Image (cartoon, rainbow, N blue to C red):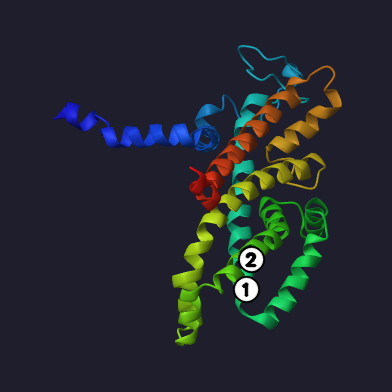
């Protein structure tokens, strides 16, 4: 019984191998993202010391057996700060992806189905898209104050127009389909049309778009923290660590190197996952294969 319980069914193994052969980006990207998530969740156990503990005698300590990633300007452990920084970056990425998709979905659905609402909302979306996302986020944070919650809200607002335009384009194309026209002609309630015919067809492109929003939000948060407009300095984040180490980069490059590698690793994994999902859900790709 024990041997049977621990054996992986052959169809599942074949399914994983088939997915690996056709879409290796999905497997690689998901594995890289899983490593980042595990590091964020298990930060209290993976970190060697308190990331805020100051040890002046270990100031600018080089990487070694005691300080794996070295020490920073005030002797804090760069390894522990990098591990805890994953929590901030992943929280921002997930929060922005959920918030941007949720509000963008609502705006896109309304714009695609209601003509007069489309004229108003799309002009507002055009105005938001005309402002670079970084500048828009900096302006919003300067008004509300630097905190993790405000960073998520500011970056989410900058991502809403892109999601709204994507959903709107899908809705406009679906309105021309015979089954949607038949539902409208037969007097089917508007909400029921959205739930039955429109919303399921937006899930695949939104899932792919969500991965790119996630990666973009992680980078944007790092940029905001780097320029001092993101999370407070007391909160370890990859952008904060890199910003603190830039002044001594010539003599202590490890302060910038390791959080920069963690940032690049996470963003690369999410982008690979997004590319793989796009290939899976793209009808043109499916028809070619």
Q: Residue at x 36, y 37 (%)?
A: 15
Q: Nearer the viewer, residue 55 or 64?
A: 64
Q: Secondary structure at mark 1?
A: helix
Q: Nearer the viewer, residue 195 or 217?
A: 195
Residue 6 spot, x, y in % from top left: 24, 29
Total marks drawn? 2
Instruction: Work out which residue is located at the far left of the displayed protein and give it.
Output: 1
Residue 230 spot, x, y in % from top left: 75, 47
Residue 217 spot, x, y in % from top left: 68, 47
Badge 2 crowding class, 10 Å Cα cut-off, few under 14, some 14 to 19, many 20 or more, is some
Name the quadrant containing residue 165.
Answer: bottom right
Name the quadrant containing residue 249.
Answer: top right
Q: Is residue 193 above or below residue 228?
A: below
Q: CA distance from mark 1 to mark 2?
A: 7 Å
Residue 31 spot, x, y in % from top left: 50, 33
Name the quadrant containing residue 270.
Answer: top right
Q: Residue at x 50, y 63 (%)?
A: 201
Q: Is residue 238 above or below residue 248?
A: below
Q: Is residue 64 above or below residue 14?
A: above
Q: Say which quadrant the N terminus sits in.
A: top left
Badge 1 crowding class, 10 Å Cα cut-off, few under 14, some 14 to 19, many 20 or more, is many
Query: Circle 2 is placed at which residue position?
Result: 169
**Do the residues bearing badges 1 and 2 touch, measured as CB atoms within 8 Å?**
yes
Q: Residue at x 63, y 80 (%)?
A: 114
Query: Circle 1 is placed at which residue position?
Result: 112
Q: Nearer the viewer, residue 151 or 220?
A: 220
Q: Residue at x 68, y 38 (%)?
A: 237
- Relative to 179, 245 lies left or right: right
User: Is residue 92 in view from this perspective?
Assistant: no
User: Is residue 120 in view from this perspective?
Assistant: yes
Q: Secondary structure at mark 2?
A: helix
Of mark 1 and mark 2, the one earlier in the sequence is 1
């Amino acid at each position: 019984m024990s041997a049977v319980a621990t054996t992986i069914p052959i169809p599942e193994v074949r399914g994983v191998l088939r997915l690996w052969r056709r879409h290796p980006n999905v497997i690689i990207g998901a594995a890289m993202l899983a490593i980042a998530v595990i590091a964020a969740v298990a930060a209290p156990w993976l970190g060697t010391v308190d990331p805020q503990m100051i040890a002046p005698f270990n100031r600018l300590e080089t990487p070694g057996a005691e300080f794996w990633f070295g020490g920073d300007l005030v002797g804090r452990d760069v390894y522990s700060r990098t591990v805890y920084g994953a929590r901030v970056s992943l929280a921002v990425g997930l929060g922005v992806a959920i918030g941007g998709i949720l509000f963008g979905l609502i705006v896109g659905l309304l714009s695609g189905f209601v003509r007069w609402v489309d004229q108003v909302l799309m002009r507002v979306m055009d105005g938001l898209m005309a402002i670079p996302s970084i500048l828009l986020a900096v302006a919003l944070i300067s008004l509300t104050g630097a905190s993790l919650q405000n960073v998520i809200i500011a970056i989410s607002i900058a991502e809403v127009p892109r999601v709204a335009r994507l959903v709107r384009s899908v809705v406009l194309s679906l309105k021309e389909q015979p089954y949607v026209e038949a539902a409208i002609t037969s007097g089917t309630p508007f909400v029921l049309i959205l739930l039955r015919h429109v919303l399921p067809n937006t899930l695949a492109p939104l899932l792919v778009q969500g991965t790119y929003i996630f990666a973009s939000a992680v980078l944007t948060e790092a940029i905001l923290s780097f320029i001092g407009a993101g999370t407070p300095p007391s909160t370890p984040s990859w952008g904060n660590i890199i910003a603190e180490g830039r002044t001594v980069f010539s003599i202590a490059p490890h302060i910038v190197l390791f959080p920069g590698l963690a940032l690049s690793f996470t963003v690369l994994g999410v982008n690979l996952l997004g590319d793989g999902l796009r290939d899976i859900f793209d009808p043109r790709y499916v028809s070619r294969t």
